[in-house]
Amino acid sequence: MNILFLCTSNLNRSKTAEDHFAAKDPLRVYRSAGLSEKECKRNNTTLCSEELLTWADVVFVMEKEHVRRIEKYTDQRFLEKIINLNIPDVYQRGELALIEQLEKRRDAMQFKELFARIESPSSARAALRLFEASATELAETYQPGNTEEKF
């Protein structure tokens, strides 16, 4: 499974996520990139491309603005792959508090975006592989109409 982390400049949040999860889970392929051409050039970091978005099975972004940027440049082609982690740009690369936030989001499995994907067989397969949960476990936690986030 190919997993892409995106933030604004690919300097702190997405780079930390890539490094952390790649070290923790070598069976999957992790990459990261930034969504601001200006910031990526200034910091000499990887800029997101349609090729990267196509490559990824799942795309984790850090803010709602990141979803809007992707939609602006690619319409709705990649929106079904995106999960917003809602992690603000207040952390430094490798900071323990950032790693704790990443782990909290991953462990929670309460993303309303994830539940929406369960209804689609192909997306459900991706969700099951990503979170290493059984279909029964996911079905037990899914409640139609309940889109309230719990963290």
Image (tube, grey):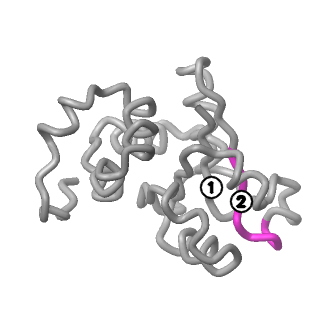
* Mark 1 residue type: Leu
Of residues 127 and 47, the one drawn nearer to the viewer in this rendering:
127
Q: Residue at x 27, y 52 (%)?
A: 115
Please tell me whether residue 33 belongs to the stretch shown in magenta.
Answer: yes
Asked whether the beta carbons under mark 2 and mark 1 sit within 8 Å of each other, the answer is: yes
Dot 2 crowding, Cα within 10 Å, few <14, some 14–19, many 20+: many
Name of the residue lying farthest toward the bottom:
72
Q: Which residues are magenta?
A: 32-39
* Mark 2 residue type: Gly
- Looking at the picture, how far across and down is residue 116, in whole percent? 30, 57
To which residue does mark 2 refer? 34
- Looking at the picture, how far across and down is residue 65, in whole percent? 53, 75
Say which mark, if any, is on residue 20.
none
Tell me the element at label 1.
Answer: strand
To which residue does mark 1 refer? 6
Q: Residue at x 76, y 61 (%)?
A: 50
The quadrant holding residue 23 is: top right
Please tell me whether residue 35 belongs to the stretch shown in magenta.
Answer: yes
Q: Residue at x 64, y 81 (%)?
A: 72
Of residues 116 and 4, the one drawn nearer to the viewer in this rendering:
116
Which is nearer the N-term, disc 2 or disc 1? 1
- Looking at the picture, how far across and down is residue 52, in whole percent? 74, 51
